[in-house]
Every structure is written in C-alpha cells, then in structure tokens.
Image (cartoon, rainbow, N blue to C red):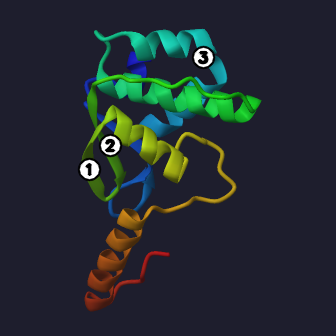
Amino acid sequence: MDSIVGNSTTLEFRTIGEGSRISNMYLTYAELTKAATEVELLSILANQNEKSVIRGYAYMAYVYLCDKEKKKEKQFNYNFTLKVFSGCLINPYTFSSFVEKVHTRRPFDPYPKKIVLDPEEKEAIKVENKIRKEQGENERK
C-alpha cells in the first residue's frame, strides 16, 4: 500500500489539477480495490501508526467493497485528519468529514458510470471557466 502514496501526505481523488488529469495514485488505488480483502483493509484502517493518506485509501476501498457486495458498512470513530486533492482544490478533512465526502461524491468507485461533482467542485469549475473565457481558451465541461 505504501507504493500508492510514496512520500505523499495528500490523498488524491480521480482527477486533479487544472487540466483534470487522472491521478496516478488513484489508478493505483483502483488496483488495490481488486486485490485487498476486507480484513486487510480494516487492519490498515485501524493501524494508528499508518499514514493517514493510506488509511484514507483503505477506507475508500472498504466502502467500495461493501458497495459492490451490497453489505452494510461498519461504523468507525477514528480521530485522524488527512488532506484531499480533488480537482484543483486541496482541503483538510477530519475522518468523519472525509467519510461524509466519500459518501456524497462516491470517489471510492474506481469504475464510475457517471462522475458526481460536489458543490465545491462545481464552483471551482465555474471560476476556472470564467478565467479560461477571459483568456480566450475553451471551457472545461
């Protein structure tokens, strides 16, 4: 799992940066969802000595596993924070606010049929498109 993040302290969702490039860390996360078991994911999540970004990816993979198998998720009360890079924004989250974001936006699904943007991301795209228009560039969809 360390190979996902290397020295990074920031969890990356599917697309990042101005050009909405696909995150390499996220692609590796997608591979993790194929290989990890529920027991392994819960073990990583419970390990307080593990990097918070790795625990975040473990949580996302656990949610994906539960969603795929139509299982009820366990409730967690962890007290760690992590930074999340989504679109053009990097924001800090407590574990509980991260859980809420994961369930609102569904970034845990590495194979989405449709990407759902949260209001924060929609606003960032609107501001970005205004700047692109002023500079004579094509707008981002």
Q: Quadrant of the N terminus?
A: top left
Q: Nearer the viewer, residue 78 or 120?
A: 78
Can the viewer see residue 56? yes
Q: Nearer the viewer, residue 97 or 121?
A: 97
Sequence-earlier tag: 1 or 3: 3
User: Three-letter amino acid code at disc 1?
Assistant: Ile
Q: Which residue is mark 1?
A: 90
Q: Residue at x 37, y 36 (%)?
A: 96
Kindly report the distance in space between the C-alpha atoms of the residues bearing marks 3 and 2: 22 Å
Left or right position of 92 against 58: left
Q: Nearer the viewer, residue 16 or 68?
A: 68
Q: Position of residue 25 (x, y in %)?
A: 43, 35
Q: Which mark is residue 36?
A: 3
Q: Residue at x 28, y 56 (%)?
A: 89
Find residue 51 and report its image quarter. Answer: top left
Figure label count: 3
User: Three-letter amino acid code at disc 3?
Assistant: Ala
Q: Residue at x 57, y 33 (%)?
A: 30
Find residue 45 and report its image quarter. Answer: top left
Q: Dot 3 surroundings within 10 Å: few (below 14), some, or many (20 or more)?
A: some
Q: Are marks 1 and 2 in contact (CB under 8 Å)?
A: yes
Q: Position of residue 136 (x, y in %)?
A: 32, 90
Q: Which residue is mark 2?
A: 84
Q: Dot 1 surroundings within 10 Å: few (below 14), some, or many (20 or more)?
A: some
8 is higher (above) or lower (below) than 131: above
Sequence-earlier tag: 3 or 2: 3
User: Three-letter amino acid code at disc 2?
Assistant: Val
123 is higher (above) or lower (below) than 90: below
Q: Dot 2 surroundings within 10 Å: few (below 14), some, or many (20 or more)?
A: some
Question: Judging from the image, what secondary structure is the residue with disc 2 in?
Answer: strand
